[in-house]
Amino acid sequence: MLSALIARIKQGHRTMPYPAEPLQMPERFRGYPVISSLERAVERVEEPSLCPYGAFTSDNGGCLDMGKCLFCAECPAGKIEFTTEYRLAVTQRNHLMVQPGSEQHHAQPLPPDLRRMFGRSLKFRMLSAGGCNACEADTNVLSTIGWDLGRFGIQFVASPRHADGLWVTGPVTENMHQALLTTYEAIPDPKIVVACGACAINGGPYIDSPQVYNGADSLIPVDLYIPGCPPHPATILDGLLRILDKIR
Amino acid sequence: MNSSFHTLYNGSAIPLTDIDQVDSSQFLQSILDAIDRGCRIVSYFGIPGPTTIPLVCVLADKSEGRLGVIRTAAEEDHFPSLATPCPQIQLFEREIAEQCGLIFEDHPWFKPVRFHHPFIPGRDAWKRPPGEPIQPGVMDYFQVEGDEVHEVAVGPVHAGIIEPGHFRFQCHGEEVFHLEVSLGYQHRGIEAGLLGGPYPRTLQQMETVAGDTTIGHGQAYCMVTEALSGLRVSPRAEVLRGIALELERLANHTGDLGAIAGDTGYLPTSSFCGRIRGDFLNMTAVLCGSRFGRGLLTPGGTVFDLLVDQRDELLTRLAEARRDLTGAVELLWNAPSVMGRLEGIGTVSNEIALELGLVGPAARASGIKRDVRHDYPFGIFRMSQLPVASSYHGDVCARTMIRWQEAQKSMDFIEEQLRQLPLGNHRVKSSTLAAGQLVVALTEGWRGEICHVAITDDLGRFARYKIVDPSFHNWQGVAMSLRGQQISDFPLCNKSFNLSYCGFDM
């Protein structure tokens, strides 16, 4: 018992001060793409859309779909550069389109009635539908003492009956699509849906595989899109705090 | 291994024509003889075709530190099963049946593995019509009958942030007689999609076979392409890959130690390890920007180099993480309430572990000294050996203890490698793949042995790319660990293996 107390003192208080203080992202973190590099990328593209996932098109000065983008270390579509801007989550699918001159979109607060209902207590039922366990792991990490998701009233629960929303990872495989629909139906109204990661948004590395559905919103309406492969926990938390209007 | 086998070393390519094709009886007898002499099946697969199905089996011979390949061709729809005399082959045979439509005669558990249509439409081992969807998890489960025997079904969706799978327990009161695991829910069609590859998407798909094992699978894929294109990876790149592989092991072992503590209800270690796991993930992000190692590896080396100040930062972070992790984990061994829950629970005997061909920490906990880094060294492990931690009780406690021992060795290794990082390039340019070759690449991921086998056609494209995740060998170990246990011990037993669903399902 004494040793546990001593260890507790040595480990210290480790919950991060975010959102009161900003987060420091790793130097090599790949976040929001640089607009000027999109323009340069267009100049270098000889044949359109060299991105194997169809994330980059050279039309209209270049357009990068962050919902399809895997934020590869070496962008196959050209020399697109990424900043360390981690605040990428949006509430509308078309807000993930990045074009030269377009302003960066962020997730918008839920409608007032939903905010009143979920603002202090938001419970999710998580469903992995072909996820590779990276999105799952970096969702899970939010519940550890470092991030302490509970302090915002957000929690992952065991039953869809206890949930206010469905949290989807993975491209939605053929073998999970019925379980996805059943789980969605089991959540009482009103409910929200979060698509976490490139797979859940548009199929990710498995886009157009005959075994997958290319993301959750081909089957159910999605309220929050969190891009990344996988998204950084900071990206996930930013999206959640924004829909609850806890940060702007 | 007898002369029917063509021997090769881990990470090397040989011309396919060098492997003599033997008839089916010689094929089967050679495999059985090799198993009797202590060899183990690392991969066994078919090459899908409308008529003849070539079959390739790769065995590992630990005493010689090398691998043996044997091949035959199944001319008809039926092929003899070896599952009864050789249990470690049973799932491989079911997989071949599901992918290629070959019916294995007298297989005791002849049922689907992942519930998908065969690679060649219409060639279905269970005569399921091509147009109709296949219901996952619908099959004949092993059943126990008798008074007061009841069945408990769990999943595919579980309580918690975890991947889907279906579990059927045959119980007598609280006691589990038998557990059968049925997976396939995460099937994304990876192997079918690799035919004719590699494609521009292949590297990212290999990194996400099991996303928590990005480096383990990514390195195996790189080794395959490097062997096929005759690339020699620089020592600096090998060291960086080795560091990333051990960081991956550390992050996951730390997470498992915390999760096991959590399942025993011991919150201090559970809370501390949950956070410290993130410290290791963040160290991987220093290397490549991704906490899971995405984008670090590329055929020919690594995408990123390690700068001097980044190296110093990693050394500082490693020392802090070591101090925190040691403090958190040492609590476990001194807490009687924890040890009482770990000891004697979920035991897998040495005999069963050998018979099932278990790999990784689960095998080592049952007294089998089996580690690819040691037995068939690859990359930097050819130069710098890590000691193999093993135990002999085979229970949850042994699997927990093994993780802590391995974590300590990994930290020593990373520190040593960071201090003596070789100079030179971290990358050489990749080139085209040689035609008509077979290559086997093994790595030791944190769950155990990862095996990638590629066969190229006349144009240097993948005629077959076979992936074996360690979970493919080990799920049967989870099932056996539950025999005679209380059903309430399932979460703890399951956590002590912590196997992959997506790595199994592909």
Image: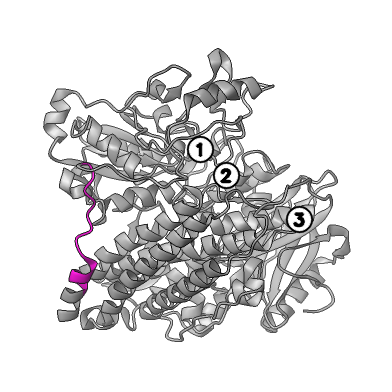
Secondary element at image label 2:
helix
Q: Main secondary structure of the magenta part?
A: loop
Q: Nearer the viewer, residue B108 or B347?
A: B347
Q: Which residues are magenta?
A: A7-19
Amino acid tagged 1: Leu
Circle 3 marks a residue in which chain?
B
Marks 3 and 2: same chain? yes
Secondary element at image label 3:
loop
B35 sits left or right of A198 in the view: right
Residue A231 location, quadrant? top left
What residue sits right under mark 2 in the picture?
B204
Let me know if residue B125 appears in the view: no
A25 sits left or right of A163 in the view: right
Q: Position of residue B432 (x, y in %)?
A: 79, 45
Q: Measure the alpha-carbon separation of dots 3 and 1.
A: 27 Å
B161 sits left or right of B127 in the view: left
Q: Position of residue A36 (x, y in %)?
A: 51, 23
Q: Measure the alpha-carbon separation of dots 1 and 2.
A: 9 Å
In the displayed image of the protein, which residue is found farthest to the top? A60
Q: Which mark is residue A70?
A: 1
Depth-wise, is mark 3 or mark 2 nearer the camera?
3
Q: Residue at x 26, y 55 (%)?
A: A146
Residue A215 location, quadrant? top left
Q: Which mark is residue B231?
A: 3
Secondary element at image label 1:
loop
Tag 1 and tag 2, C-beta contact below 8 Å? yes
Q: Residues within 10 Å of mark 2 (few under 14, many from 20)?
A: many
Q: Earlier in the sequence, mark 3 or mark 2?
A: 2
Amino acid tagged 3: Leu
Q: Position of residue B441 (x, y in %)?
A: 68, 62
